[in-house]
Amino acid sequence: MAAILIKNATVVNEGRSEVKDVLIKNGRIEKIAGQINTSEPVQEIDATGLHLLPGVIDDQVHFREPGLTYKANIQSEARAAVAGGATSFMEMPNTNPPATTQELLQAKYDIAASTSVANYSFFMGVANDNVDEVLRTNAKKDQVCGVKIFMGSSTGNMLVDNYVTLNKIFSETELLIATHCEDERIIKANKEKYPDADNASYHPLIRDVAACFESSFSAVQLAKQHNSRLHILHISTAKELQLFTNMFPITDKRITSEVCVHHLHFTADDYPQLGNLIKCNPAIKAKENKEALWEALLDDRLDIIATDHAPHTWEEKQLPYQQAPSGLPLVQHSLLMMLHYVKEGRISIEKVVEKMAHAPAQCFLIRERGYIREGYHADLVLVDMNDSTTVTKENILYKCGWSPLEGVTLPARITHTLVNGNVVYENGQVLDLHRGQRLLFNR
């Protein structure tokens, strides 16, 4: 592996931005200094005028493999991820079959080991009837990112609504518990209230604030009862924010939270234009929720920014509202979306790095990633903040081939992405010559 010397980059790391050189050897960051000169052969990257960030760690994606590979697969979506500056991902268990046994979970790791250009981890899935299988994951707690519970929300056959199951998982698992929180009883009642719902504007009325809050509240109560390590995914409502605190740092929190880029970017006002393309669970809701999410992100009640990247085919998204699946593809554009808000002055680039790289590493206790530090794996992204990127069908790398952002120009451009010290993306091209590594955890 050739050594790489990145020269004159504005290094954004741990709350500071400073012009530095970075030397990379054997896949790791060897040295960070104001100026580095070396007599050994290196590949030099002139980063004058560019920002060097730690690679994005996306803690929630759906890459659809196995079983749903007509929508996406680990190889295609990992390529899109690195093109967007995401160097590591954690993938959800609701594939076909769902990853609810140790053998099925390992099969996904085997696929990623041979096809993923990004680093990877996979959640163990919880169902009402696989408690013992889930608890076997305790023996691999340093190798698996967490266990995933669709808590009160129907997703395929993975709805978990058995209190005995929930109580045993919350009391006995030694891994982080990640939850999708929506109350299915409230959703069903709302569907009866709107039997003629025929477009996506009904979606936040059916999957409403109460459905989210009641389920999140139940998860928090269980976690507090058992002192569990709980991480609630894709918070979408102002009301849920009362469940979280900023009174102490993320490293001391037992209950953490995530917000997704689409809940920070879109509102219910966008349904008339985008319709099913932004239909997702939990739903994108009224504007006041978006504003509250931004406030909580900036004051650290919300800990992580992620995507919930969930591709479906264009044809599926053109079905009538009630038949169209929920989810939208975002992993290639999430960092650029947040840099748009940096340009607008709504958030600093240092805060973006904190929420998309540092905080996921801290939340999941990821070993030696998420920071630009000597000795850490060289997962890095170079960004030109003086250029722009227009999202078009020609440059979309998702297997599904579409994005709700098509035609939008985002005011930054990713020039290089490095994974474990290898340049895997450079100026519009994925260099698919290397494979990512399995994430490891300090548990």
Image (tube, rainbow, N blue to C red):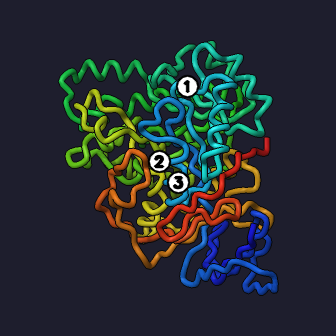
Q: Which mark is residue 216?
A: none
Q: Secondary structure at mark 3?
A: helix
What amino acid does circle 1 point to?
Pro
Of the image marks 2 and 1, the number of the one nearer the N terminus? 1
User: Is residue 353 visible from the viewing direction of this image?
Assistant: yes
Q: Nearer the viewer, residue 392 or 299?
A: 392
Q: Mark 3 or mark 1: which is in front?
A: 3
Of the image marks 2 and 3, the number of the one nearer the N terminus? 3
Q: Mark 2 or mark 3: which is in front?
A: 3
Q: Which residue is mark 3?
A: 79
Q: Please tell me which residue is depicted at 46% across the width and 44% down the height of the picture.
A: 309
Give the percent coordinates (x, y) of residue 259.
Answer: 49, 47
Q: Which residue is mark 1?
A: 98
What amino acid does circle 2 point to?
Cys
The image quadrant where one finds the N terminus is: bottom right
What amino acid does circle 3 point to?
Arg
Outermost residue toward the front? 433
Q: Nearer the viewer, residue 3 or 14?
A: 3
Give the percent coordinates (x, y) of residue 230.
Answer: 63, 35
Q: Nearer the viewer, residue 17 or 286?
A: 17
Q: Which residue is mark 2?
A: 260
Asked whether the residues under the numbered discs 2 and 3 touch, taking CB atoms below 8 Å apart as contact, a structural biologist would say no
- Left or right, residue 326 beside residue 125: left
Q: Residues within 10 Å of mark 1 (few under 14, many from 20)?
A: many
Give the percent coordinates (x, y) of residue 62.
Answer: 50, 39
Query: How many angstroms separate mark 2 from mark 1 (CA)?
Result: 23 Å
